[in-house]
Amino acid sequence: MPIMSNRHLSGLLRGSPFKPIQEHMRIVFSCVCLIPPLFDAVYREDSASVADFAEQIKLLETEADKLKSTFRLNMPRSLFLPVDRKDLLSLIGDQDKIADITEDIGKIFLFREMTVPTEIKALLDELLEGTMEIAAAAKDMIEQLDELLEVGFAGRELDKVSLMIAGVRRSEHNIDEIMHRIKKKLFSIEKNLDPVSAMFWYQMIDLVGIISDQSENLADRLLLFLSK
């Protein structure tokens, strides 16, 4: 995927300050969307596909990082908005961490061949499904920022976003429960695995879990917006 030009990035900033944040979140979500096919390539022990998906994630993460940096450099010092400048900078930073984590997942699979223990595959699939759902919900929340601005962060649109925030927080709790079950199962088969492989699988589970944690952070950030 081609990297955005500086001209395009600067153009986003001339309108609503939410536009580049939304554009950034779309790129971040594109990173997350590559995680299930990446895992599928690992399941199939298809190293060429693993490398291809890891490279795609790397390119998207670079694109997201470039947009984040341009946003920070070009954002006006004062904004006539019901949202503080520093809060917007924190929001895009929280989004960017999701892309960073996704790249970390790709790097581990790229540099280390990992065989998926049969006993945890179904639970991993459940975790990936939940991760995609919460990431999509977080993206949908960010897409509502312009509508919230238009109605002055009040009214029916506010109720809609509040429900979305509550849904993300519930999803994060469900993912925590799935992670607990995966780790419990992994612990039960640890003695049958190479110790280093077991360590990397614990790390991988935690990395995927951080995506849901960061999605909840976005929900909390929006909740902060709404409470001011």
Image: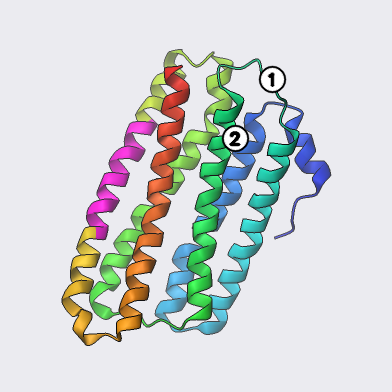
Q: Amino acid at mark 2?
A: Leu
Is 57 left, or right, of 225 in this rendering? Answer: right
**Mark earlier in primary sequence (2, 1):** 1
Which type of secondary structure does the marked residue at label 1 adopt? loop
Q: CA distance from mark 2 to mark 1?
A: 13 Å
Whether 4 is drawn above or below 147: the answer is below
Q: In x, y percent, where is residue 28?
A: 56, 50
Residue shown at the point (47%, 34%) measured from the top left: 141
Q: Is residue 148 visible?
A: yes
Is 170 left, or right, of 215 in this rendering? Answer: left
Is 163 left, or right, of 70 in this rendering? Answer: left
Q: In x, y percent, where is residue 57?
A: 58, 63
What kind of secondary structure does the magenta stretch mostly adopt? helix
Callouts 2 and 1 close, C-beta under 8 Å: no
- Picture quarter containing residue 138? top left
**Which of 36 and 179 lies nearest the eye of the viewer?**
179
Q: Report the label total.
A: 2
Is 6 left, or right, of 98 in this rendering? Answer: right
- Residue on which disc 1 sits: 78
**Which of 131 and 71 lies nearest the eye of the viewer?**
71
Residue 153: image tag: none
- Picture quarter containing residue 184? bottom left
Residue shown at the point (32%, 32%) measured from the top left: 166
> Which range of residues does the magenta coloring cover?
164-179
- Residue on which disc 2 sits: 89
Residue shown at the point (48%, 38%) measured from the top left: 140
* In the image, residue 227 lies in the stretch drawn in magenta: no
Q: Amino acid at mark 1?
A: Ser
